[in-house]
Amino acid sequence: MAGRRQRRESGGFASRLREVIGIYGSASALAKAIERSEGAVRKWLRGESEPNVTDLRCVCEATRTSVEWLVTGRGEREALALGVREAASAYENATHKPLDYALLEGVIAAVDEELRRSSLALPSTKRSMLIVTLYDLSHERNQVDREAVARLVKLAG
């Protein structure tokens, strides 16, 4: 049963990735843009494997796709993507909400729990990127998304 569920989830991810690549151009062009082999991208498309967190972020940045949509199928496909200068300017000019420490602690606890459950150990840079990504996803909903935590920890490992 778990095997079927995993294939169905992989198929969903692969299907969404295929949609993104169709809009972007080609698997070859995406592979070049994210500095990965075309073979790796084609494995993702066939559902034989999934990208790690770093590759997932690169795919989403290159294609202006929401991480949440690509991973779970929820939310809007298109992410609001700004260039570095525009992002820096927006950051400097925006009025920021204060960091939600309770939510951040919840994300960290969920990541730690999932890492223990999966018997994974991540380097601090990967763990930090994972926490930032999950905080951003959780902040939109104002709650920790346990399904996203499990999926992204799996991808990070």
Image: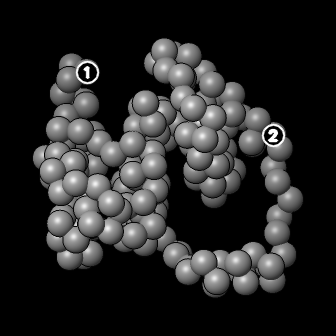
Q: CA distance from mark 1 to mark 2?
A: 33 Å
- Residue 98, horizontal then vertical, whole percent: 86, 59
Query: What residue do we see at 32% from left, 68% from top?
Result: 33
- Residue 137, horizontal then vertical, whole percent: 58, 52
Residue at mark 1: 2
Judged from the image, the secondary structure of the residue bearing numbered disc 2 is helix
Query: What residue do we see at 45% from left, 45% from top?
Result: 53
- Residue 104, horizontal then vertical, whole percent: 74, 42
Query: What residue do we see at 15% from left, 51% from top?
Result: 39
* Residue 19 shows up from this direction: no
Query: What residue do we see at 69% from left, 33% from top?
Result: 108
Tell me if residue 47 comes above or below residue 59 in the rendering.
Answer: above
Left or right: residue 32 versus residue 68 is left
Quarter of the image that includes the N terminus: top left
Residue type of the residue flagged with mark 1: Ala
| Viewer-nearest residue: 69 or 37 | 37
Disc marking residue 38? none
Tell me if residue 122 comes above or below residue 87 in the rendering.
Answer: above
Residue at mark 2: 102
* Residue 92 shows up from this direction: yes
| Viewer-nearest residue: 120 or 133 | 120
Left or right: residue 153 versus residue 71 is right
Q: In the rendered structure, which disc, 1 or 2, sits on the residue that comes first in sequence?
A: 1
- Residue 101, horizontal then vertical, whole percent: 83, 44
